[in-house]
Image (tube, rainbow, N blue to C red):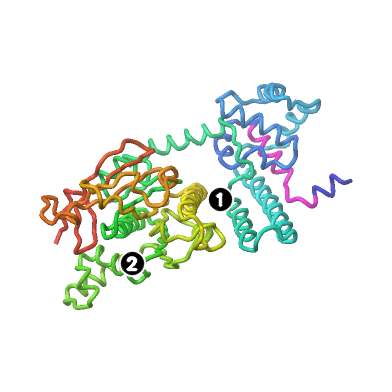
Amino acid sequence: MDEELSLKQQPQSLEAEQAVLGSILIDSQCLTDVIGILRPEDFYLQQNRDLYTAIYTMFNFSQTIDPVTVLDKLRELGLYREESRDYVRQLMEITPTAANAVRYAGIVRDKAMLRALGQAAADISETVYSQVGTPSEILESAEKKIYALRKGERGDSLEPIGVILHKVFDRLAELSRSDADFPGLSTGLKDLDSKINGLNPSDLVLLAARPAMGKTTLALNLCLNVAKKYQKTVAFFSLEMSREQLAMKLMSSESFVNSQKIATGKLSEEEWSQLCMASAALSQTDIRVDDNPSITVAEMNAKCRRLDNLGLVIIDYLQLMTGSGYGRSNSGENRVTVVGEISRALKIMAKELNVPVICLSQLSRAVESRQDKRPILSDLRESGAIEQDADVVLFLYRDEYYNENTEDKNVAELLISKNRHGETGTVRLQWLPQYGLFTDREWKHAE
């Protein structure tokens, strides 16, 4: 009686569960489609869950799947029951055809999602009434629970290596079919892409330089390339410049109209026309700009979770951020500790959102006291933790900033000082200050 009540309370479809298992036992070819939809924990009835666990394990090891081998695997896993043989025969008898396996799997997945949503709602309700933590912390926790469901993530973060390998092979197959020379999103700079394999999901990329080197400009160049080439949403958090200033910079690089002229508004008719065309092109992209100067990582994370087609997050810049996800940092706080905490939170955010996060950073004045002013890792300001958390560390350097008579006029160096995807080294770029644009050296603007 209690079990009947439980079945009524929880969203489930035993018919769909039996139909999907029957389909697999009739024709194991349909498992290729079902495996991407269902995991063992999606099954409500324990007997069905055990049966699918055996099938799932066999699939991961490319073993032949039929009624006899599945029963043998149940014995091997210690999941065999007295009624298992009769149950397997029954499943095959009640399933007319394997043609609708994907439809059955969808029903089972939907019911599992509803059960998970109900559990999340119960957990959130319990947290609210227990009043453990601040309202901001409870809200952050609730958002994470719902976001995890939306992304199809499970509560158990311990995943069998067989499941992980299955995902790796799927990714390799996807890459082999792709025309791209690297796995990540293109930066728009060929030499940089070949060094760091593009901008990869869950990567924290640190772009650091002394003031006035062009950090924000380079970040905007990357932002625009991803937004235009991949039709992805790019979130740009600007803690220093206003939305309008950033928009003007984007218009200059897109229209090839001198940024000084745009700032003064003294434009020719042709330049006005170029700006209108650039504005129309920019309006087609999905670039979101937030210029709240006191935003925290937790707030950024919450905002980004609500974006459906997110491809890239850019933050300008690290040292302006306030610490500890919820409260504002006190003046007495150790700034090294705060920046370390922020950089760790940014890496976690990149993993959660599964998109590249580019964070800009200032460098310490130690650079100025050296004869060779090219930055090194120890110049990262206020925290060694930044170097540790970042997957890629890029330093931007322009020699003409320090030496007026340099032979490298309008040349920028991008020093790759840390790279988890390959080798370190230097990429030389062309710098077009009048348009606020960094390009490959061989690039030419068609007038």
- Which image quadrant for residue 74? top right
Can you give x and y, in whole percent of width and height, for residue 446 in the image? 15, 58
Measuring 32% from the left and 65% from the top, which residue is drawn there? 282
Q: Nearer the viewer, residue 434 or 58?
A: 434
Q: Nearer the viewer, residue 165 or 367?
A: 367
- Which image quadrant for residue 129? bottom right
Measuring 37% from the left and 47% from the top, which residue is drawn there? 199
Circle 1 Cα neighbour tier, 10 Å, few/some/many (<14 / 14–19 / ≥20)? few
- Apparent side of residue 43 relative to residue 8 in the rendered image (left or right): left
Secondary structure of residue under mark 2: helix
Please, what is the three-letter code of the amino acid marked with disc 2? Leu
Can you give x and y, in whole percent of width and height, for residue 230 in the image? 37, 53
183 magenta-colored: no
Q: Which residue is mark 1?
A: 151
Secondary structure of residue under mark 1: loop
Mark in the foreground, 1 or 2: 2
Question: Does residue 35 sit above or below 308 in this rendering?
Answer: above
Question: Does residue 425 sit above or below 131 in this rendering?
Answer: above
Count every numbered label the image shows and give the total: 2
Q: Which residue is mark 2?
A: 246
Measuring 29% from the left and 55% from the top, which residue is drawn there? 210
- Point out the stretch of residues depicted in magenta: 8-24
- Apparent side of residue 281 relative to residue 136 in the rendered image (left or right): left
Can you give x and y, in whole percent of width and height, for residue 275 in the image? 24, 71
Please, what is the three-letter code of the amino acid marked with disc 1? Lys
Distance from the alpha carbon under mark 1 to that under mark 2 = 31 Å
12 magenta-colored: yes
